Every structure is written in C-alpha cells, then in structure tokens.
C-alpha cells in the first residue's frame, strides 16, 4: 500500500470546507511509519547533512528516527517559551494574525548543512520561518522535506520562490 493511502482525510475539520489530512493514521501504522522513514533516509543517506531541524510537533516524530538513521544531530524548532536556554526567534504571518518559532541560539554553527523536516506543507508560513531562522544562524539548508504536500495551497511554491528545494512523499491536489 502507498503512504498516501494510509493518511486519513477528515471532511469539514476544523471548519466547514476543509479537507483535513490526518497523518496520525500513517504514524500508527508500523509499516507506513517505517516506509516513510526508510524513504526519507534513503534520499538523504549520501548527502552531507550535519543536523536535522524538526518543526514542532509532528516534525519531531519524523526528525528523531531520521537523525538516528543518518547519524546526525537533531534540532527542535519550537513555539515560544518551550526551550530552556537562550533562543533566537522568527515571526511569521498566519491567515488571521501572526506566530513565532524559536531555536536554541547555539543549535547551529555557521556553515552546517541542515535538513528541515515537518509532516505537511500547506501555506508554507512555518516552513519559511524555519528557513529564515536557520539562515540567521548561517546554516546551509540542504532541502525542506515533508510527508504531505497540499500544492493548491501554495507552500511548496512559496519555498521554491525563496530558493529552497522541497521534497515530499505524497500530495493531495484539490481533493
């Protein structure tokens, strides 16, 4: 079975008209989770990556086993106030308002090659903020990778528009 077939769609969640892509069904399926991690590790095994920057919270689920397999460090990109040491922050816009992410100020050394990981790319706001925060720390982004792309929402194009490479395992186009 394909990875896409293991992702549940919930109609009208969290509001009417939204088709929510629920990745928890992929994560709870041992074969689906293993297949996802194996495909990502196969893609990145020969690249010289120093760190994986995983975006809160579902990105942690992917980032930890991927970092383990690739034998690289794992960096947590979190919401404000969740990291205990000195942080660097990055604001970003939401549909109705703004938000912020943080990273420990000593998590990336200049020149380190970083892979940004999250479960899904929709508008690309959080991922773009992650790119900016890694760049502030002078890290070199290898790629931004996700399980799911929602191409109709434009996040992939947004990241590519700022010069980033994007990789996804599946997409849900206009469905």
Image (tube, rainbow, N blue to C red):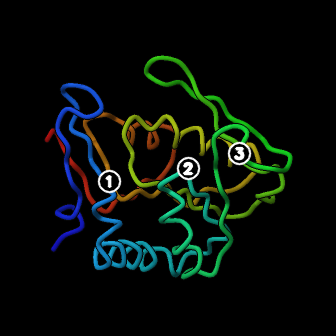
Q: Is residue 122 left or right of residue 126?
A: left
Q: Is residue 21 left or right of residue 88?
A: left
Q: Is residue 175 left or right of residue 125?
A: left
Helix, strand or loop at mark 2? loop
Q: Split into 4 quadrants, where in the image is the N terminus? A: bottom left
**Structural crowding at the residue carrying mark 2, measured as other residues with C-alpha within 10 Å and reported as few (<14), some (14–19) or many (≥20):** some
Q: Are the two marked residues, 3 and 2, in contact with CB atoms closer than 8 angstroms? A: yes
Query: Pointer 3: what residue?
Result: 82
> Against 61, is 166 above or below?
above
CA separation, marks 2 and 1? Answer: 16 Å
Helix, strand or loop at mark 3? loop
For the image shown, how many numbered marks are present on the structure?
3
**N-terminal of the two: label 2 or label 1?**
2
- Residue 56 numbered tag: 2
Dot in front, 3 or 2 = 3
- x, y (%) of residue 125? 49, 34
Dot in front, 2 or 1 = 2
Q: Is residue 25 left or right of residue 66?
A: left
């Amino acid at each position: 079975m394909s990875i896409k077939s293991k992702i549940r769609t919930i109609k009208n969640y969290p509001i009417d008209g939204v088709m929510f892509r629920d990745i928890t069904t992929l994560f709870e399926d041992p074969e689906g989770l293993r297949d996802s991690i194996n495909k990502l590790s196969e893609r990145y095994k020969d690249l010289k990556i120093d760190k994986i920057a995983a975006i809160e919270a579902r990105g942690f689920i992917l980032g930890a086993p991927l970092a383990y397999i690739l034998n690289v460090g794992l960096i947590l990109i979190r919401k404000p106030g969740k990291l205990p040491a000195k942080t660097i922050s990055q604001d970003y816009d939401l549909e109705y308002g703004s938000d912020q992410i943080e990273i420990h100020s000593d998590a990336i050394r200049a020149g380190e090659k970083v892979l940004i990981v999250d479960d899904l790319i929709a508008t690309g706001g959080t991922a773009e903020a992650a790119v900016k925060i890694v760049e502030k720390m002078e890290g070199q982004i290898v790629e931004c990778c996700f399980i799911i792309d929602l191409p109709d929402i434009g996040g992939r194009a947004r990241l590519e528009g700022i010069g980033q490479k994007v990789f996804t395992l599946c997409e849900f186009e206009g469905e």
